[in-house]
Image (spheres, coloured by chain):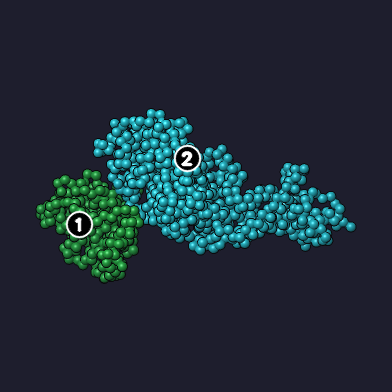
Chain colours: A green, B cyan
Amino acid sequence: MEILVCIKRVPDTSENEITVNKEGTDIEREDLVYSVNEWDNYAVEEAIRIRDKVGGTVTVVSLGSEETEEVIRREMAMGADKGIHLMDPALEGSDGRGIAVALKAEVKKGGYDLVLTGAQADDGAGQVGGMLAAMLQRPFAALVNHIEVTGADTLRIGREIAGGNQEFSEIRLPCVLSIQTGINEPRYVGIRGIRKVASVEIPIHGISDIAVPAETVGKTGARVKRIDYFTPQLGKGAEILEGSDEEIIDKLIEILKSKGRIK
Amino acid sequence: MIVEFISPAKASFLGIPAIILWWIIPLAGIGIFSYILYRRTRPLCLASFDPRINRLAMRIGATVRYALAQYRQPRYPLAGILHIFLFVGFVILSLRSITLVFLGIIEGFTLPGLGGALGNVYMVVKDIAATIVLITCLIAMIRRGVFKPKRYDVPARYGKNHTTEAVFVLLLISGLMVSDALFEGSLVAYQFQSHLETEMVLPMTLKGMAAAVLAPNAASTLQAVHMAAYLSHELIFFFFLCFLPLGKHFHVITSFFNVFFMKLDKGTVKPVKWDVSEEQLDGLESFGVKKLEDFTWKHMLDFYSCADCGRCSDNCPANAVGRPLSPRFISIKCRDALFERYPLWSGAENEKTLMDGVLEDDEIWSCTTCGACEEECPLLIEYIDKIVDLRRGLVDEGRVPQSLQKPFSALEKRGNPYGKMEKKRSEWAKDLGYVKVLGKKASAQTLYFVDSITSFDDRIQEIARATARVLQGAGVDFGILGSAEMDSGHEVRRFGEEMLFLELRNRNTEAILESGVKKIVTADPHAFNALRHDYKGIPEVEHICQVLERKLVSGRLRLKKIEDPHVVYTYHDPCYLGRHNGIYEAPRRVLDAIPGIRRVEMERSKDRSFCCGGGGLMLFYEPIEETRMGKLRVEMAKKAGATVIITACPFCMVNIEDAIKTSGLEGKMKAMDLVELVLQQMDWGALPNSKPTAETHSEAKNGH
């Protein structure tokens, strides 16, 4: 099975203190450290597991600046066979739709059976997977937490639905799935693993390589414009409990009881 | 009429000279034994390189101490003394057994030097020894079979009970003693009957008793007993010899070598491969131990040498809290896997890897590397290096628990497991005002290496501040590295992420050398151990307790009287200060320098200290366990009558403070770091020049 996993390099929320810059146009990026978006990491692990079971290749693709290469390499160290780096000045400032346009072209070019994306990105809107599927006119399932290959062109997929219940569906290949965390336990990639793939060539595709007109992507093609970033004010309903752990727990239980949430 | 008493060498059965048999049995026995040993050494030849033929004086010293003098045996008094009796008896009687074998071939054989008076003395000594050995065997059998000490139990997941093997061997040894006694006793009885001269026989020895029991029998009966006893001795002796390498009694042969080749450097971790330099590591196809042959030959010898005594697991804190780790069974399972993979009569079998069939991931991650097992093992078997090697293998395969992946990633990106910003590393010092951040603008004699937990954890920052204030008060010219300091990497290395460790170490080494300090001090035993053993070419490192002790002796520090006479202190030895670095007395002397202090020792203290739960990355790991090590430790302190547990390690503080809370002892018991107590008791008035040196906290001020 030919699998493409779309990944994104994002500021790691657990290793950064995210603050909004003075102008309110972006977050402070000076001291940030980046990593692969957590959901995407699960998607790559799942793709590798499927490949190990049924054969085929796993390709990871990412759209972004030069630094993006580091996350592509990391996922290749994990076990992906190939990497593709989508980079072109014309792609800068793309909105979710622009990214989906570029990815669609890449999927068409490579002829993949299965396309995986993360359910969302730490800094995104959770829109690329769905749009990509629509543009490709392929079946799509979101928030997938279980995949089983059941036939030559069928998958049995599971999704968690309200109340912790599980829903299973059959989906036909080729398709697009957005992957939820917890679908597996991603393997660890250390410095050693990354060094092993340090010299592997990662082709850079510009818009001419994938035949995407410049006006459909980048700033010009973007239909969503970011106008402001701000830290929300502390609302009225918010209450910060104080005291020792035991006191806080007691107060919390009391509040939950009084609001009727627990009996 | 005097019937001639025929010796084995002269005897014949059905007209065939018995000497043929006395040749065949030893030759067959030695032949089979040599073949088994040859097969057993095969995997050792295929194993990884391990340079152990060095520092011979130290090795000989250790062999005398641990192998010949059985130094560690009496740590378990009853079992230890029984073993010493058996061991000494074995040494004495091995000469006798060899003599007996030759007696079948050469009439009246004696070993060189044991022919004359010395021989007579030897005979008496060995008669006594044989008697003691038999009594010891009886006691040991009763102990194993009736009283069944708990530490010999085999939990169901580790296989079947081993008592049968132990008792069987005790029976074999007893058989040797009894057969020799009957062999000689029958002769003595005959000589006595025939009014011949007999050698000296002590009445209360086995031989004496055998002679007395046999005395009323006819000469022909005595002759038959004599020959049967000889045959039994031959058969048991050579059967036993060949049986040794088949199980835990292999240690009878291997332990001498195992001790001689022991690990000499405590606190260190073996390199990934002894014959591959750090620069060449990138070229390695595979890292760590994944299959049996990845172990070094010495580590295989460890498996062969394990005597299954269970002392390691009896002291293992992970085992005590019900984690799926028992060091004893690491050895036993790997030994059995070696036996299975390298069978005696056919080629190598069973290709299964270690981690899929022999050992389990959780077993390997459960170890806190506290070193209690290694401290206890009478045969100096190593565990930490094996655990680290196995972890290296797991890391290389990407089989790292999810709970550890985040801190690893944070260490890679931020140099600390919490993912905190580098510039916040020195925030704890802001309010003190006088802690220098070493760099272009500031220099100092001494570097205070803080390490991650002490820099970032709210509670542990208090230890950092106490350390700084005490150093300041004691007139030490010191500074910190600030944002240039990275995690020492102590646990990173011990959790198997060698490449990440090397990166952290290299960055720290560079920063330390650049700072131009002459000395390093730290309040974290893990950092202390890393800097002392894992780093090379940096200034000398001390733990704060050593500095405190010196300053107290020199009078540079004075302590005032403890006010509350009801407070009882106990000192908890951190593993990486005590067992791994042998620093037991300095912290105790610091405590005892406080006037009016009431201090008690816990039952498990010093080299038997009980790990609080482990440090560094172990705080992130989510083990399978029934209770927590810290809770058991707090119970021990309570039992000792202590109300304050003094530690000298930030991780001990976290674990013990947690345990005090979860044990519901808040208010009744308290944990304090040694430095915090010293700060509390400091007599500032008595200090010469106690004015703070007016240095600024440059980094914090400049906002980096």
Residue B335 in sight here? no
A234 or B334: nearer the eye? A234
**B309 sits left or right of B24 in the view:** left
Specify the amino acid type for callout 1: Lys
Picture quadrant of residue B249? bottom right
Q: Is residue B530 above or below residue B104?
A: above
Specify the amino acid type for callout 2: Leu
Residue at x 47% of width, y 53% of height: B635
Question: Is label 1 in a helix, a strand or a loop?
Answer: loop
The quarter of the image holding the C terminus of chain B is top left
**Coordinates of residue A247 in the picture (x, y in percent):** 33, 56
**B627 sits left or right of B114 in the view:** left
**Label 2 neighbour load within 10 Å: few <14, some 14-19, many 20+:** many
The residue indicated by pointer 2 is B591
Residue at x 21% of width, y 67% of height: A139
Q: Chain of mark 2?
A: B
**Coordinates of residue B269 in the picture (x, y in percent):** 45, 45
**Coordinates of residue B523 in the picture (x, y in percent):** 40, 41
The residue indicated by pointer 1 is A236
Residue B672 in sight here? yes
B382 or B662: nearer the eye? B662
B605 or B84: nearer the eye? B605
